[in-house]
Amino acid sequence: MPIPTENVGSLPRPAKLQAAIKDYDAGKITQQQLTLQQDAACLDSIKRMEATGAPIVSDGEQRASSFATYPLTDTLAGTGLAENLAADGQYFAIFIDGHHRQLPRLTGGPFRYKTFAADYLEKAVKMASKPLKQAVIAPSMLALLYPLDGEVQGYTREQFLSDLCNECEKDIRKCFAAGAARVSIDFTEGRLACKNDPRNPWTGRGMLEHFIELNNRVIDRFSPAERKNIGIHTCPGGDCDSTHSAEVDYAELLPSLFKMNAGYFLIQLASEKDKERVYKLCGQYSREDANGVAQVCFIGVIDPLNPRVETAEEVCADLVLASKYIPTARLGSTDDCGFSPFSIDVKPKHGSPDAARDIAFEKIAARVKGTQMASEELGFRAAA
Ligand SMILES: [Zn+2]
């Protein structure tokens, strides 16, 4: 088998779709009209991703309000917010360029998803000729819907966490049932949990171990055969070409990260200053046997926040260097993050979302080609 390669999930929404979302929020177009734009963007995303040569593709999350809020709301402006939620929750993250993203707030129980990732996937399956992956949100992110202190009246934190874990499990199982070859769990709050940003109170509370336990509460409900295809994505955020926790040392995160009993990890690395040190940490802390499954490290070789397209040679060199520290049988390649985890994103460093889409497909093609080169160099047989 050659070295596996897989994207994280999202692509920039075309300018036309972003305009349609705003028109929908303003009541100028119907949901049906918005859906037509989403259909077109999904089809374009899948066809162009397939054309890069990628062995596994996604719909680029073109229907999702964001990687974190898709179960809860139709748009980031709060149109179609699920029951028992208010729009004014805590900050999820404050990015280094100063902008922030906010979560809804739980106002009562029970907590239920309004939309499952499989609702999108079922439509994508009909458009694709290659295997599909689907990203889902981690329970640890949605745990932040519950107020940090105090209790929601009539709905204890433990009742909420129990409902949350059930919904997350259902989200993953429905993806596999709809035909997903792989399901990865977005865990961008993991690295952010190691930071203490006084403007964002939840970050200063040492919540990483709680997050890991909560996620394992869901992951451990799956068999080793299922967990082989359940991944975890870690990154320092990637919104509007900006990050929220890139200064956090991976040495603080990785020992805990690999305690999650997932079969693979999609790890931001292309934009790290000292990649070799992180490869070494991945080799050191990833486990050959995580309750019956070997942990495969997909190292980030593409930076979605930087418009410069990496060369296939650079991708190949990263993988060859990483193979010094990570066993080649447990090595893969990925992008550092989704190319646009939030639906409304002008991709400022790229000039426009449409330009950023063109660049994204060039970058994915370079990842695929460079990974093939590394496979050959490291002595893997090319796929028949
Ligand atoms: Zn990410």
Image (spheres, rainbow, N blue to C red):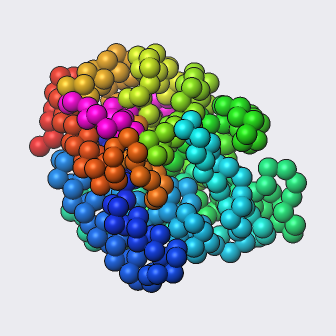
On whether residue 253 falls in the magenta region, the answer is no
Q: Is residue 301 magenta?
A: yes
- Closer to the camera in the image, 160 or 313: 313
Residue 15 sits in which quadrant?
bottom left
Instruction: Please give left or right for residue 210 compared with residue 329 in the image.
Output: right
Q: Quadrant of the N terminus?
A: top left
Residue for point 40% across, 67% down: 19
- Left or right of 369? Residue 278 is right
Frontmost residue, 4 versus 189: 189
* Quadrant assignment, res 134: bottom left
Majority secondary structure in the magenta region: loop
Residue 327 in picture, x, y percent from top left: 36, 23
In x, y percent, where is residue 227? Answer: 47, 47
Q: In the image, is residue 322 above or below residue 147?
A: above
Q: Which residues are magenta?
A: 287-312
| Residue 14 in view in this figure | yes
Query: How far across and how far down the image is residue 333, in percent?
Result: 33, 35
